[in-house]
Image (cartoon, rainbow, N blue to C red):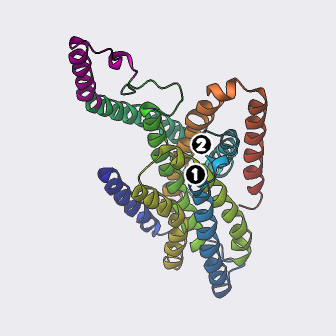
Amino acid sequence: MQNFIKFYLTFICLLLLLPTLALAECTCDAGGEGKNKSEALKYKAIAIASILFAGAVGVCLPILGKTIPVLRPEKTIFFIIKAFAAGVILSTGFIHVLPDAFDSLTSPCLGENPWGKFPFTGFVAMMSAIGTLMVDCLASSYYTRLHLNKAQPEERGDEEKAAVEAHEGHVHTHATHGHSHGLVDSSGSGPSQLIRHRVITQVLELGIVVHSVIIGVSLGASESPETIRPLVAALSFHQFFEGMGLGGCITQAKFKTKTIVIMTLFFSLTTPVGIAIGIGISNVYNENSPKALIVEGIFNAASAGILIYMALVDLLAADFMHPKVQSNGALQFGVNVSLLIGAGCMSLLAKWA
């Protein structure tokens, strides 16, 4: 876990340095209409506070919900809440992030060759989804082998103990007592399931963090109050709903307190920090410069691929095929309705953000 935290810190630092790649000369006009730096700065300050609060509340609600019996992961209502959050994440990928990537990589500010001759956005999103699948499988396989290696000595000890007791004539049933050192657990809460939840949570946060930084930098670099004003409320709701989805995954992953705090802080701070960076480079940053368009487009496309894969495969498919959902018609109906409401609400926000 220490290595994961170090990797995460390094990745975030590199991600936050990406805007410097866009500080280049531009070939398209930045557009000066509606600019008011002092008024825009006030809205940016409000945006930092609002988005920070909304994101922190959203991600903390499911985590703190563990203390409320009805909101625990094994309860019915948790499946409904998680379906809503998965709908939000799916809509974020399809409706918010992927169209932005298409806009960036098909901009007339980019040269016809090669950007106009190949669908780079779809290609990057596809490769990102395939890469996520590979990371998902490799990480799960690695942690599964790690768990098996740790469990084997304990299992051998149990077997030797059972053999000695049987030899002494004691009527014990240790050999068939069903020690749960293996990876099969019909309750869905065994070691293998815990490993899956941890891998899912880490990859999901990676996808969310990437596009959160890009959103923050874009908002912070804007000097138009008319552009920023509607984004404040829209992005606050956006972070709140996304936080609920991530918080639900963190709850199921059962990380240690230190890791939960770090992951919560990363999620809550990335967009506000992105806004602060955008404010700092607003005098030299031009969102229509070729470098800015290429960097934003590629990272948005990669983020969309991650979010779409995670929402469909690791969140929705896993929960919708869960025995508890499959055996309960009312719950099945509830999670489907919740999914549609979550995706619908997030899609509606695309009107303003």
> Marks 1 and 2, Cα distance to the nearest angstrom?
8 Å
Q: Amino acid at mark 2?
A: Pro
Q: Quadrant of residue 172?
A: top left
Residue 217 in view here: yes
Q: Amino acid at mark 1?
A: Lys
Please report the residue visible at 54 percent of the width from the left and 58 percent of the height from the top. Answer: 293
Residue 118 in view here: no
* Residue 27, x across and y down, in percent: 54, 65
Taking the image as shown, residue 175 lies to the left or right of residue 15, namely left
Q: Please tell me whether residue 161 belongs to the stretch shown in magenta.
A: yes
Please report the residue visible at 51 percent of the width from the left and 37 percent of the height from the top. Answer: 129
Taking the image as shown, residue 126 lies to the left or right of residue 36, namely left
Q: Which residue is mark 2?
A: 73
The span shown in magenta is: 151-178
Q: Secondary structure at mark 1?
A: helix
- Answer whether labels 1 and 2 touch (C-beta < 8 Å): yes
* Residue 140, x across and y down, in percent: 40, 33
Q: Quadrant of residue 216?
A: bottom right
Vertical relation: 271 (above or below) 338: below
Q: Secondary structure at mark 2?
A: loop
Instruction: Say which mark, if any, is on residue 324.
Output: none
* Residue 194, x across and y down, in percent: 45, 37
Please report the residue visible at 65 percent of the width from the left and 40 percent of the height from the top. Answer: 75
Q: Which residue is mark 1?
A: 66
